Amino acid sequence: MPDFHTGSCLCGAVTFKTRGDVREVVYCHCGQCRRQTGLYYAASNAMNEDLTVSGGENVTWYQSSQKGSRGFCRTCGSALFWKYEGAGHISIMAGAFDTPSRLVPGYHIFCEDKGDYYEINDDLPQYGKSSPDILTNTE
């Protein structure tokens, strides 16, 4: 199995490659994630030094909170990244990875904030707010 992952935005203006391991997929149900995506964020992450982005000039960053920013393609609008200020890693939207992604599901966060129009119907762990190892906008 290769030790890298690749992906892109919808239009291909932004592509990326990760080296090494990526985190399991975390599903975030907070109000910000729901408003940006219409449902919830599903994101993995990679260490900053393990991510190479081509077309980075096409990434627009929106500071969505005091310490968090969201990166999206300025051409097609695809949500791509979430970055906590000063963190050594960057979250990458699971849907942006090429298939087969080899990503594995992890757990749900901010379940107390989930929309009232869907249910969480899997056996993954659920946290009312965040989990102890995830940096979020609330910190």
Image: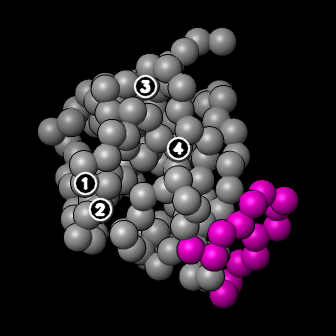
**Which element is circle 2 on?**
strand
Q: Main secondary structure of the magenta part?
A: loop
Q: Amino acid at mark 3?
A: Thr
**Closer to the N terminus: mark 4 or mark 3?**
3
- The residues colored magenta run 116-129
Label pair 1/2, CB-CB below 8 angstroms: yes
Counting from the top left corner in percent of width and height, residue 92 is at: 44, 44
**Which element is circle 4 on?**
strand
Rounded to the nearest angstrom, the CA distance separating label 1 from label 2 is 6 Å
Rounded to the nearest angstrom, the CA distance separating label 4 from label 3 is 11 Å
**Which element is circle 1 on?**
loop
What label sits on residue 68 in the rendered view? 2
Relative to residue 22, is residue 61 depicted above or below? below
Residue at which label 4 appears: 44
Q: Amino acid at mark 2?
A: Gly
Counting from the top left corner in percent of width and height, residue 105 is at: 70, 46
**Closer to the N terminus: mark 3 or mark 2?**
3
Q: Is residue 96 left or right of residue 39?
A: left
Rounded to the nearest angstrom, the CA distance separating label 3 from label 2 is 21 Å
Assign the C terminus to one quadrant of the image: bottom left
**Closer to the N terminus: mark 1 or mark 4?**
4
Label 4 crowding class (10 Å Cα cut-off): few <14, some 14-19, many 20+?
Answer: many
Label 2 crowding class (10 Å Cα cut-off): few <14, some 14-19, many 20+?
Answer: many
